Image (tube, rainbow, N blue to C red):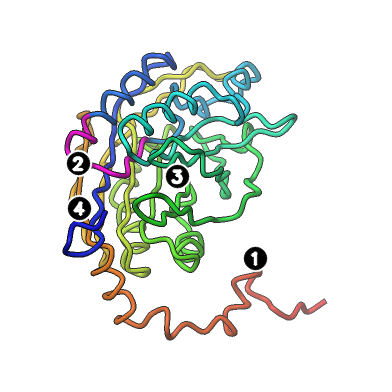
Amino acid sequence: MDNGGGRKVKVAAVQFACTDSPSDNLATAERLIREAHNKGANIILIQELFEGHYFCQAQREDFFKRAKPYKNNPTIQKMQEIAKELGVVLPVSFFEEANNAHYNSIAIIDADGTDLGLYRKSHIPDGPGYQEKYYFNPGDTGFKAFITKYAKIGVAICWDQWFPEAARAMALQGAEILLYPTAIGSEPQDSGLDSCEHWKRVMQGHAGANLVPLVASNRIGTEIIKTEHGDSKITFYGNSFIAGPTGEIVAIANNKEESVLVVEFDLDQIKSQRHGWGVFRDRRPDLYKVLLTLDGQTEKPF
């Protein structure tokens, strides 16, 4: 929005504890979206797979029933109605069924309720408590920058946030704000492992390296899922945050409370700062061919 002093946009991150009732979670999400809107937010980020518990703690065939097609998806349609009513941009995370494929996906809803398209999670984790490879095919959309009413945004999902290549790909396409819906917490196999500070620092680095604001939305609460080996438990650590274009955290939630964070950024001022810093001027794509390999070898010895 141009308020006379530049293109100023208010972004929001919401965080809450999920039940395993889609209708209850949708109602909570709507309530927090409306609270963010009342605080002036233009772009509002809801956490990853917010319709229910994080089911990827277990490998269970019955959980595939949670997936729904992208088209005529009732949750997306409801969010389109809310976006249009409030005039806000809403990235909407969901478990997508596409014929015999399944994706961890997000639909980008513009402020007039228009569905701008889909991003499918590219990096799929597989470890104790986070067994996503059982459910999700690797995303095939590639990284995108979506032109919304208020800003050009890049949206990626959870495990994507650990990869600087994803953030840079979105920034190269003109993304002015990066958004990461997330579900992350404790590690069932190691109660002493706490990734929270690492998680934040990595994304702060993406904001600073690309000189763009960044929004991360995570869930809270403890969820127990029945597995073939007994119960699995994750306590999600929240800490949803908004970072500025030098990586500084300008708003952050705690690890226990439902929260709505709202921060205003002047995108024109940040654009000038980004161009003046020179990191995009001085890039050397001709030297980055090694990034297209897995083993760092551009010339194979065989």
Q: Is residue 3 above or below residue 103?
A: below
Label 2 or label 3, whichever lies nearer to me, is 2
Residue identifier under label 3 = 158
Badge 1 element: loop
User: Which mark is first along the chain, 4 or 1?
Assistant: 4
Give the distance between the C-alpha atoms of the residues marked 2 and 1, in whole angstroms. Answer: 44 Å
Horizontal placement of 49 versus 300: left or right?
left
Q: Amino acid at mark 1?
A: Leu
In the rendering, at what x and y percent does residue 239 appear?
Answer: 25, 41
User: Around disc 2, counting alpha carbons within 10 Å, would you say few (fewer than 14), some (14 to 19), or many (20 or more)?
Assistant: some
From this viewpoint, which residue is outermost toward the right?
Answer: 302
- Whether tag 3 and tag 4 are in contact, CB under 8 A, the answer is no
> What residue lies at 46% left-to-right and 31% top-to-bottom?
49
How crowded is the residue under tag 1: few (<14 C-alpha within 10 Å), some, or many (20+)? few
Q: Which mark is residue 264?
A: 4
Q: Residues within 10 Å of mark 4 (few under 14, many from 20)?
A: some
State the count of labels: 4
Residue toward you, 142 or 146: 146
Q: How much space separates mark 1 and mark 4, taking CA atoms?
A: 39 Å
Callout 4 amino acid: Glu
Instruction: Give the residue pinned by disc 2.
Output: 40
